[in-house]
Image (tube, rainbow, N blue to C red):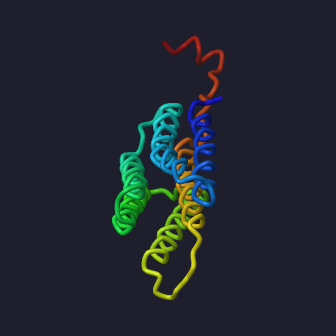
Amino acid sequence: MPTSRVIVILYAFAATAHVMATAAGPASLAWATAPLLMPLLVGVVIFGATETGQRPTRWLLAGLFLATAADVTSLAGPAAVRLIVLVASLACYAIAAVTARRWAGLEWGLGFVLLMLSGALLAARLSDPLSLSVPAVLPTLAYVVGQVLVVTGWTRRSMGTPRVPRPRTPIGAFTRR
């Protein structure tokens, strides 16, 4: 099994623990899992790229580092700062898609939409202009699922189909050096 898939499985365990801790669990578990999520996805990007013989996308990595900063900010800093850093992270993802000059796929697009929904739900929880009661688990769930969809969609996009060399004819094998 490729290393990138193993890291995705580890991310799934950490994300599940984080979402459950946000919903009803102890705050200490949410504090312990929040800083682990995005570095695991950075590992997926790096190992996924090296497994296919490519270089990791800088803008995607920059977006993941900003998402890590947003996760750490959510632990101790004001939530408005987290929202600003998340918007910067989304901007990095959008730049990565534009610079690739190819559509990153349905998985990536769905993840991007979920991340925007997560930001909107977080903003609704912050401002509460309409007295909406958004449970804390909804933005968190949209966030962790959106992030993994963006990363796995991007790494699958870059893998493509492997090239199989054309077989040589027996005469061509003897005449070429």
Residue found at the far bottom of this picture: 130
Q: Can residue 99 be seen?
A: no
Determine the image quadrant of residue 75: bottom left
Residue 85: x %, y % from top left:
35, 61
Q: How many marks?
A: 0
Q: Is residue 95 left or right of residue 152?
A: left
Who is closer to the viewer here, 135 or 168?
135
Who is closer to the viewer here, 107 or 121?
121
Taking the spot 57% from the left edge, 79% from the top edge, the residue there is: 133
Who is closer to the viewer here, 158 or 152?
152
Taking the spot 48% from the left edge, 56% from the top edge, the residue there is: 102
Q: Is residue 70 left or right of residue 139?
A: left
Residue 54: x %, y % from top left:
45, 36
| Image quadrant containing the N terminus | top right
Residue 147: x %, y % from top left:
52, 54
Who is closer to the viewer here, 160 or 41?
41
Q: Can residue 56 be seen?
A: yes
* Residue 149 to residue 176: above or below: below
